[in-house]
Image: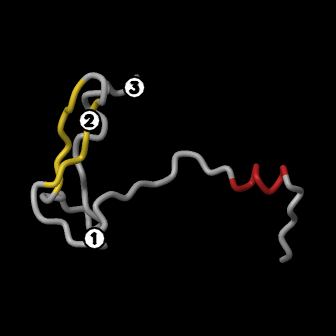
Amino acid sequence: MAASTCDVFSFCVGVAGRARVSVEVRFVSSAKGKGLFATQLIRKGETIFVERPLVAAQFLWNALYRYRGHW
């Protein structure tokens, strides 16, 4: 069974597996949903969000344009 929308994306974990304390997820409104808000200063260039791609379409793109990689 799928998780309810209240339980999805409500906790941020850093690359080392530690909880990020500089950001938090808050409910904004029913029209906008949830947002990621800073709780501390975030330096320029600092990574605050990383995720794995859900779908990759590279092979489809290659097939459409008949690209054949040279091995």
Question: Badge 2: how crowded within 10 Å, few (<14), some, or many (20+)?
Answer: some
Q: Measuring 10% from the left and 61% from the top, which residue is drawn there?
A: 40
Q: Nearer the viewer, residue 50 or 71?
A: 50
Q: Amino acid at mark 1?
A: Glu
Identify the residue position indicated by label 3 in the image.
2
Q: Measuring 84% from the left and 49% from the top, which residue is drawn there?
A: 64
Question: Badge 3: how crowded within 10 Å, few (<14), some, or many (20+)?
Answer: few
Label 3 or label 2, whichever lies nearer to me, is: 2
Marks 1 and 2 sit apart, C-alpha to C-alpha, by 22 Å
Secondary structure, mark 1, is loop
Label 1 or label 3, whichever lies nearer to me, is: 1
Secondary structure, mark 2, is strand
Image quadrant occupied by the N terminus = top left
CB of mark 3 within 8 Å of CB of mark 2? no
Q: Is residue 34 left or right of residue 62?
A: left
Identify the residue position indicated by label 1 in the image.
46
Q: Amino acid at mark 3?
A: Ala
Q: Amino acid at mark 2?
A: Lys
Identify the residue position indicated by label 2 in the image.
34
